[in-house]
């Protein structure tokens, strides 16, 4: 498991995410807006529970493989939200709304089809995803991080590390991969280079 989601890395997640992701607030506002009206909601790779805190569904479930992230989510969410340590495949029920935000680019290329098929098994309605999109302009990303308050050297290091660790697809490849899993593209709901968010409907 990536060390950025464990121990001290998990503790720094909220601050780090806001520096790494341009328009972080706008992203999560767009996700919540696209999921208005769903009665059940699953956040896959729920992290610290940002989306679970924003989506007003009767039933809310978050799943994450990192125990420290589950703990952070538990600290901010009320007891009505169910949190599961594990993967989406560990669940059995389907949900009207599913979100996987800033997760898919961590999935190795050879595992992406299986990852999105797993989301389809849990989704009977709307899916919203957000990911790093290739090709990545590393210089532009670094400049945006600096504008978000990251020191120049740290921004360059963070971008270089991300480029070495992540597995981004192009916009076209990502949409095709998700559609192969049993979804239909609805719309692009948010974009702040080098990231984009898309909404799909299950078929």
Image: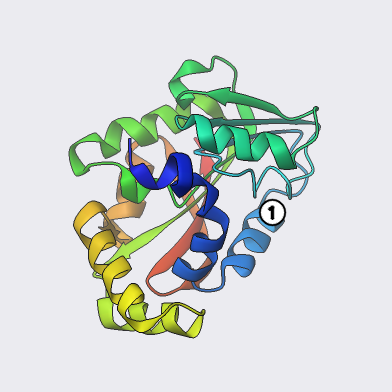
The residue lying at 52 percent from left, 35 percent from top is 68
The residue lying at 26 percent from left, 53 percent from top is 166
- Image coordinates of residue 14 in percent, x first then y, are 57, 56
Figure quadrant of the N terminus: top left
* For residue 191, side relative to residue 35 (left or right): left
Question: In the picture, residue 98 is in which quadrant?
Answer: top right
Q: Mark 1 = which residue?
A: 32
Display coloring: rainbow
The residue lying at 74 percent from left, 30 percent from top is 81
Q: How many marks?
A: 1
- Image coordinates of residue 203 in percent, x first then y, are 49, 35
At numbered mark 1, what does the secondary structure look like: helix, strand or loop?
helix
Q: Is residue 179 visible?
A: yes
Q: Residue furthest front?
A: 8
- Image coordinates of residue 23 in percent, x first then y, are 56, 73
* Foreground pick, 201 / 13: 13
- Image coordinates of residue 88 in percent, x first then y, are 48, 26
* For residue 74, side relative to residue 57 (left or right): left
The residue lying at 27 percent from left, 82 percent from top is 139
């Amino acid at each position: 498991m990536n060390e950025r989601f464990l121990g001290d890395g998990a503790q720094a997640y909220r601050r780090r995410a806001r520096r790494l992701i341009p328009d972080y607030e706008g992203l999560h506002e767009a996700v919540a807006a696209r999921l208005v009206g769903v009665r059940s909601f699953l956040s896959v790779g729920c992290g610290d529970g940002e989306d679970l805190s924003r989506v007003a569904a009767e039933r809310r479930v978050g799943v994450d493989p990192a125990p420290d992230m589950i703990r952070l989510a538990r600290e901010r969410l009320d007891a009505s939200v169910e949190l599961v340590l594990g993967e989406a495949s560990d669940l059995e029920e389907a949900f009207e709304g599913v979100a996987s935000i800033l997760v898919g680019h961590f999935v190795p290329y050879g595992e992406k089809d299986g990852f999105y098929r797993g989301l389809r098994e849990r989704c009977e309605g709307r899916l919203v995803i957000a990911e790093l999109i290739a090709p990545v302009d590393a210089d532009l990303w670094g400049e945006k991080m600096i504008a978000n308050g990251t020191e120049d050297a740290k921004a360059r290091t963070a971008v270089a590390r991300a480029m070495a660790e992540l597995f981004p697809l192009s916009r076209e490849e990502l949409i095709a991969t998700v559609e192969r899993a049993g979804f239909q593209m609805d719309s692009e709901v948010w974009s702040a280079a080098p990231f984009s968010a898309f909404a799909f409907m299950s078929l």
